[in-house]
Amino acid sequence: MAVNLEQVAHRPWPLPAGSWVMAQSWHDLLFAHWPLREALLRPHIPARLEIDTHDGQAWLGVVPFRMSGVRLRGRPPIPWLSAFPELNVRTYVRADDKPGVWFFSLDADNRIAVAIARAWFHLPYFRARMSCEERNGWIEYKCGRSHRGAPCGVLAGRYRAIGEVFSAAPGSLEHFLTERYCLYAADKEGRILRGEIHHAPWPLQAAEAELTSNTMPEADGIHVPPAKPSLHFSRRQDVVVWQPRRLAL
């Protein structure tokens, strides 16, 4: 895994000051997105954050994938901690004119990784029983939340790429949904933090998916509309992450 810190022309703002603290690789991602009215998401988003929209439309994303090579800067990956499936439910927000991602939930099949992410990044991670395997050209994916005291949620189905690789054009919906270089979270006191990331432009492909169950958004209190989702696939993305920083009031 190698992230080129000199490749920055695609970024909407300069790299953050200081050194990154964590590296990871993301594999076999499905970006499934549904349009929603902004008013439906507003009760679930801190007031400090503006809901980001594209052509006046807010978006809900469900993104299954698997991770590998998770490691701290200067340290090798730990075999039993560095590779596992993950699933996130998300929307898009901005603060101080920096667009980013807000996660309603993140599920992972690694108890220790969940505990670290909740404590360090203040993200709503949950333990889950998960599998992610490639069979006959499809990614077969299952996720069942098992975190004690958390609402139950399930994602099950399969997906695959069906088009040529492309980079999203600035201003396009695909660019809006994927080219994000920070995340936002809230600590126990409700203070907002921003975590910066860096990666190359997303290598995207059109995708198809057969989802037999998708109750993860409902577990987070958000109803998925009956419309067909916008679907995109990416085979791999290498990422580095900076220490989260608290936003000024």
Image (spheres, rainbow, N blue to C red):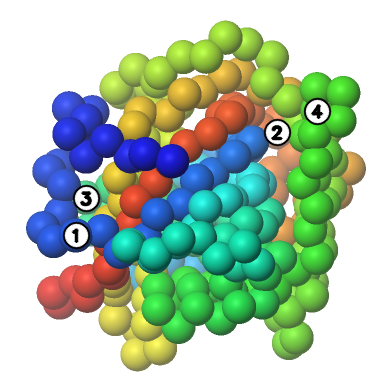
Q: Nearer the viewer, mark 1 or mark 3?
A: 1
Looking at the image, tell me whether mark 3 or mark 2 is earlier in sequence order: 3
The residue wearing badge 1 is 19
Percent from the top left, x then y, of residue 58? 46, 44
Compare marks 1 and 4 and give the one earlier in the sequence: 1
Q: Tell me the distance, in whole angstroms, between the alpha carbons under discs 2 and 4.
A: 23 Å
Q: Choose top left, top right, bottom left or bottom right for residue 71.
A: bottom left
Q: Using the image, determine if residue 174 lies above or below residue 38.
A: above
Say which residue label 2 marks: 227
Measure how far apart labels 1 and 3 are at the Cα level: 20 Å
Question: What's the amino acid at mark 4?
Answer: Trp
The earlier-in-sequence mark between 2 and 4 is 4
Q: Residues within 10 Å of mark 3 (few under 14, many from 20)?
A: some
Name which residue lies at 29% across and 22% down: 170
Against 96, residue 56 (above or below) is above
The residue type indicated by label 3 comes to Lys
Q: Which residue is mark 3?
A: 98
Of badges 2 and 4, the one in the foreground is 4
Circle 2 crowding by C-alpha within 10 Å: few under 14, some 14–19, many from 20: few
Amino acid under disc 2:
Ala
Choose the circle earlier in sequence order: 2 or 1. Answer: 1
Residue bearing the label numbered 4: 138
**Corner quadrant of residue 161:** top right
Image position of 235 with respect to 81: above or below: above
